[in-house]
């Protein structure tokens, strides 16, 4: 359970006496907005962290929090997991990185390919973004086509094509049955927008029609089986079926982005939802908390990376690809994630979602909870969203999420407001009940902003 210091308001990040405030003042001099990631939450300024211990984080002012962020769902074993600490320490004593391959990279690849159906071969890279990028390049090389299709609001990292419509809004997203390709940053090349077809998640009819219209130019459709930024939306079985059918009929590859959702089970998320991708991008948990990504899939497609007999169709290198420290950490983390560990996380996740749902029903509150396995996301909406547009927050709903986030923080829980929350193996039922009790208190207080939707 959370215990946090009795330090007074002066240790809150907003207070000028706090160490977070002092750090932020320094950061603002050397970083454009004081930090180095757009995703850092600030309310009003970021909370700086001193260290992590299992399921908990301790900030620079000595406050202790249950961590439901886990570095954006990476830390499935929490912080400073002893087997990872030992593996990394051992590896760094033997050298940090080499230009030659290591036996351990084969071991991690064997572990992944041994668990996941249709994952016949992999290549390691350093981030999920790179894994997505190389999956798309592989699909292009395999099909000889250049365009891709992606789902509105889905986050796949920072490769231009997948950034299209990542944050589309009612002002620019266009008709529901013909979503616009929305630039993600000023100056995004028109060619990128022209070569990216945007599809509505869970809308089988529109997806099939849009894919058929552009079929001859499409190399791949990239899909996250439960897109988290778009709302942690549950995929409908008929939508997954329709996607397969239209892609197969038109020689278009299916790329599953499981960078985040690989944590949904021993064999990942596609397996759970009946998606049979040609290629997968994975990352986060497979690096045990160190930077990693992997692109993998059918050997016939992965052959585009084959440099054994000359220049491959897709050259893929990377100074830090398959770096021994990430591989060592990943092996330690993944070995500890046996089927029992996933079952344990599943039980914790169900317990938390059930308790949150019970509170929502008890208070007839304008909320719903989405997610599966060790992931969840609370929406300030009475009806569970099925699409990005339904999950999109009005300004009033954003205020409600800000109020909920502050309530969690005040009570010693770091809760991501605009992303998925995640659980980790060091958590116990008492931690889950603590989160559920804090949510119940929020609803019981009953002072929701008036704009809450019903
Ligand atoms: C679904 C998905 N794809 C790709 C990425 C990009 O991964 P990375 O941040 O390691 O580049 C992320 C990161 O959050 C993600 O959630």
Image: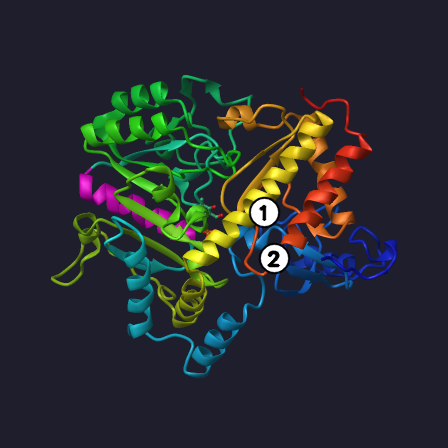
Q: Verify CB contact (< 8 Å) between mark 1 and mark 2.
A: no
Disc 1 secondary structure class: loop
Residue at far left of view? 309
Name the residue beneath numbered marker 2.
427
Span highlighted in magenta in the image: 128-144
Residue 437, percent from left and from top: 73, 44
Disc 2 secondary structure class: loop
Crowdedness near tag 2: few (<14), some (14–19) or many (≥20) residues, C-alpha within 10 Å: many
Q: Is residue 420 visible?
A: no
Residue 313 or residue 414, whichever sits in front:
414
Name the residue beneath numbered marker 1.
38
Residue 171, percent from left and from top: 56, 21
| Left or right: 439, with 203 as reference point | right
Residue 234, percent from left and from top: 46, 33
For the N terminus, which image quadrant?
A: bottom right
Ligand 1 within 8 Å of disc 2? The answer is no
| Left or right: 444, with 268 as reference point | right
What residue appears at the point 77 percent right and 22 percent down from the top-left corner? 450
Frontmost of labels 1 and 2 is: 2
Q: Earlier in the sequence, mark 1 or mark 2?
A: 1
Dividing the picture into quarters, in which one does residue 30 lie? Answer: bottom right
- Identify the mark at residue 323; answer none if there is no mark: none
What residue appears at the point 71 percent right and 40 percent down from the top-left corner? 439
Judged by its main secondary structure, the magenta piece is: helix
Q: How many labels does the image show?
A: 2
What residue appears at the point 60 percent right and 51 percent down from the top-left corner? 69
| Left or right: 260, with 217 as reference point | right
What residue appears at the point 71 percent right and 29 percent down from the top-left corner? 362
Residue 358 or residue 87, whichever sits in front:
358
């Amino acid at each position: 359970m959370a215990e946090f210091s009795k330090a007074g308001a002066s240790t809150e990040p907003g207070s000028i006496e706090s160490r977070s405030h002092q750090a932020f003042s320094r950061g603002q001099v050397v970083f454009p907005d004081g930090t180095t990631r757009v995703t850092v939450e600030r309310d009003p300024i970021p909370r700086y962290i001193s260290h992590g211990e299992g399921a908990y984080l301790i900030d620079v002012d000595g406050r202790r929090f249950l961590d439901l962020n886990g570095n954006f769902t990476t830390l499935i074993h929490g912080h400073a997991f002893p087997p990872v600490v030992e593996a990394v320490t051992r590896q760094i004593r033997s050298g940090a990185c080499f230009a030659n391959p290591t036996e351990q990279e084969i071991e991690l690849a064997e572990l992944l390919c041994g668990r996941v159906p249709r994952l016949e071969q992999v290549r390691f890279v350093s981030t999920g973004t790179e894994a997505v990028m190389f999956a798309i390049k592989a699909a292009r090389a395999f099909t000889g086509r250049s365009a891709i299709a992606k789902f509105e609001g889905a986050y796949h990292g920072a490769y231009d094509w997948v950034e299209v419509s990542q944050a589309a809004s009612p002002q620019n997203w266009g008709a529901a049955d013909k979503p616009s390709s929305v630039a993600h940053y000023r100056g995004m090349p028109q060619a990128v927008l022209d070569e990216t077809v945007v599809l509505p998640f869970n809308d089988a009819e529109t997806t099939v029609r849009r894919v058929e219209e552009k079929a001859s130019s499409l190399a791949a459709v990239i899909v996250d089986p439960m897109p988290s930024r778009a709302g942690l939306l549950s995929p409908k079985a008929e939508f997954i079926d329709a996607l397969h059918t239209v892609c197969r009929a038109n020689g278009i590859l299916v790329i599953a982005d499981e960078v985040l959702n690989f944590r949904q089970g021993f064999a990942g998320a596609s397996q759970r939802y009946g998606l049979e991708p040609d290629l997968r991008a994975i990352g986060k948990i497979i690096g045990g908390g160190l930077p990693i990504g992997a692109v993998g899939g059918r050997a016939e497609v992965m052959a585009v990376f084959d440099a054994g007999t000359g220049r491959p169709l897709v050259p893929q290198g990377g100074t830090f690809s398959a770096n021994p420290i990430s591989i060592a950490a990943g092996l330690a983390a993944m070995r500890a994630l046996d089927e029992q560990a996933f079952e344990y996380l599943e039980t914790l996740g169900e317990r938390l979602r059930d308790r949150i749902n019970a509170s929502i029903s008890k208070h007839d509150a304008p909320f719903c909870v989405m997610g599966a396995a060790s992931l969840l996301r609370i929406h300030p909406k009475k009806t569970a969203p099925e699409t990005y547009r339904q999950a999109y927050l009005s300004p009033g709903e954003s205020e409600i999420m800000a109020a909920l986030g502050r309530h969690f923080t005040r009570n010693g829980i770091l809760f991501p407001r605009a992303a998925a929350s995640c659980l980790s193996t060091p958590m116990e039922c008492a931690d889950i009940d603590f989160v559920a009790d804090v949510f119940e208190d929020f609803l019981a207080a009953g002072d929701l902003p008036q704009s809450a939707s019903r």
